[in-house]
Amino acid sequence: MAYVDEYTVFADTTNDLHKKVARAIYKAATDVVNEDAGTEHHAERFVWASNMRLHPDNIINEAHKYMLYVLDNATVAAAGNAAEDSDVQFVINGLVNTMAGV
């Protein structure tokens, strides 16, 4: 996808990819809440995850904030709004520590 097209996907917060990213963030947050407390950086991850789950508006903001990171994945960028849920989830799962600030 060309940069201008990626920007269009990034800027339109009502598109399907934004919705998929938001849902993937919620799922990742749920997984973090349920992960073993011995997981590296669990405390920081747990604070982030709790914040996401308790305040749904934060998920929407987080989705927009990290959309360009998601579009750095060639598979997701090529598919755009048609990206598979599993591909979006893979990218978001890889960003959890970044989103949690660790």
Image (spheres, rainbow, N blue to C red):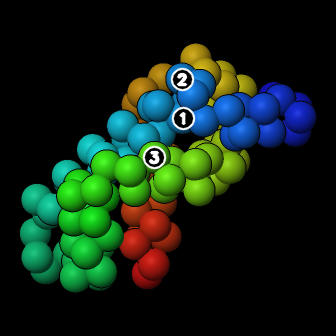
Q: Which of marks 2 and 3 is in front?
A: 3
Measured from the top left, where is residue 22 in percent x and y? 42, 41
Element under label 2? helix
SS for callout 1: helix
Asked if disc 2 and disc 1 are in contact, CB closer than 8 Å, the reply is yes
Quarter of the view holding residue 53 = bottom left
Point out residue 73 in the picture as x, y percentages from the top left corner. 64, 43
Along the horizontal axis of the image, is 59 left or right of 32?
A: right
Q: Residue 79's spot in the image, x, y percent?
A: 65, 22
Nearer the observer: mark 3 or 1; the answer is: 3
Q: Give the structural element (helix, strand or loop) at label 3.
A: helix
Q: Which residue is drawn at 47% across and 39% down?
A: 21
Mark 2, residue position:
16
Left or right of 3 on screen, residue 24: left
How far apart are the alpha carbons under marks 3 and 1? Answer: 8 Å
Instruction: Please name the amino acid that badge 2 sits on.
Output: Asp
Real-space Cα distance between discs 2 and 3? 13 Å
Residue at the location (43% across, 81% down)?
102
Residue at figure coordinates x 11%, y 76% from the top left: 37
Say if residue 77 shows up in the picture: no
Query: Which residue type does callout 1 highlight?
Result: His
Does 48 sit above or below residue 101? above
Q: Return the residue at label 3.
A: 60
Q: Which amino acid does label 3 sit on?
A: Ile
Per the image, the residue denoted by label 1 is 18
Q: Is residue 44 above or below residue 53?
A: below
